[in-house]
Image (spheres, helix red, strand yellow):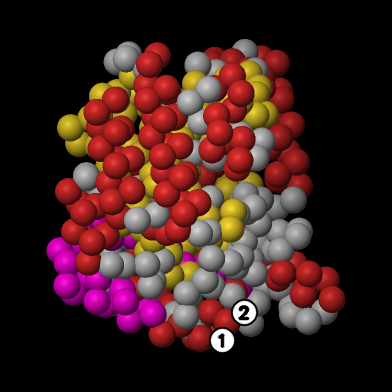
Amino acid sequence: MKNLIIQLNFPFCFKHCSYCPQSVCKYSPQIMRTYVDAMLREIQAASEDMDDYGVTAISLEGGSPVLAEPSGLQKVLRALRKQFRLAKDIQISLQTMPGDYSRALMQKMPDCGVNHWIFGVQTADLKEHMLLERTYSYETLSMVDVALKTFDVHDRSFELLYGIPGQNAHTWEHSLDSVLSYAPEHLTLLPLHLYRGTELFRKSQEGALTPCTTEEKIVLYQLAQRKLAGLGYVQYTIHDFTKPGSENRYRLEQLKGTEQLGIGYKAESRIEGVTYKNGHSLQQYLDHSDDLSVLVNQLARLDEESELYREIRAALFTMQGIDLTEIQQKYGLESEQKAAEMIRQMETEGNVCFRDEKWVLTDAGAVNFL
């Protein structure tokens, strides 16, 4: 059977964080219940031609998936289990943030197979928290304590941002120590990029704040690397650190190019070399979630150059490095020349260097890599 990963996309938030470039939908309990019903119809329709696939990883993401009622998430996961062939050791990841936890959520999700919890804390510093305009109040950080101490939660992953304007080594280490106090199995440390159209980008353009420089981000990145290595964490991508056996399987499968089925509005799919997104609008998705011919948006077929770029990106992201000889053997001389051109440009920008017979990201490349 062919491997498949599934993205369950819930593009809803109470409000926009100041750094977030994603387009999100306005949340209401009624619209979310309608949305869950639409996802159930899509799952039924999408499963009809997927008998030769086995699902190895599922990611519930957004937005904020836990804005849906626990019973709604339960229905979606049960529908997937009924309609698709799920691997016995499947990893099901759920993205949450402080303040999202309820007894029903923490009890029902493990029963549905959720076994990888991602806590999007981003920062444990009050000033940074206010700058990011996170959707939860700072005081609800204590909800993490409640959730982890009350319920038997394993495979916990914490997500933090570094390079926040005004952040320094002291506040960064405080955030690291705060999440490390829970002895998580996994951490994701993301460099903050100021995307055009976000509130933080606007403030930086107006001079109301000063973005972190690449050099400042490198200092924070290296500080985290030293601390986590000393605690036994293994870095397996430029952003991810894990205790053995707790890698984010969905992310790794994405990087490998495993075929992906997206369920939900704006969810992304990559099936048999064709990529597409769901829906031109939320209303269109709600009305036609069971009709792929109507939903398909941004349809494209991956050519050899696109596949080459994906492979180069994955090799850099996972720190395996790029061997141009292997590129030539797999894709031919012309592709090797294209890869060499990409690498020369990245070398000129200071983002890659040649080390141990391969091209790898520099620290500057790691903190700037998109």
Per the image, label 1 sits on a secondary structure element best described as helix
Q: Residue at x 33, y 48 (%)?
A: 72
Where does residue 131 sit, x and y in percent of width and height? 62, 79
* Distance between the alpha carbons at the discs numbered 1 and 2: 6 Å
Question: Magenta segment: does it hold 274?
Answer: no
Closest to the observer, 318 or 293: 293
Tell me the quarter of the picture where residue 292 sits: top right
Residue 131, disc: 2
Determine the residue positioned at 22% across, 45% down: 112
Residue at the extreme right of the image, as rendered: 206
Q: Name the residue under label 1.
A: 127
Magenta stretch: residue 163 in it?
yes
| Image height of 129 relative to 356, above or below | below
Residue 157 quadrant: bottom left
Taking 95 as reference, is 341 above or below it?
above
Determine whether 134 is above or below 325 in the image. Answer: below
> Seen in the image, is 357 located left or right of residue 236?
right
Residue 263 is situated, as x and y percent measured from the top left of the image, at 46, 35
Image marks 1 and 2: residues in contact by CB distance under 8 Å: yes
Q: Horizontal placement of 201 versus 80: left or right? A: right
* Label 1 crowd bin: few (<14), some (14–19), many (20+), radius 10 Å: few
Q: Residue at x 25, y 32 (%)?
A: 81
Nearest the viewer among 165 and 146 is: 146
Specify the label residue 309 is tagged with. none
Which percent across, then down, holds residue 50? 37, 17
Q: Residue shown at 61%/35% (left/top)?
A: 284
User: Which residue type carries mark 1?
Assistant: Lys
Q: Is residue 41 visible?
A: yes
Q: Is residue 367 visible?
A: no
Magenta residues (range): 140-164
- Local packing at callout 2 (Cα closer than 10 Å; few below 14, some 14-19, many 20+) is some
List x then y, in percent, for residue 119: 37, 64
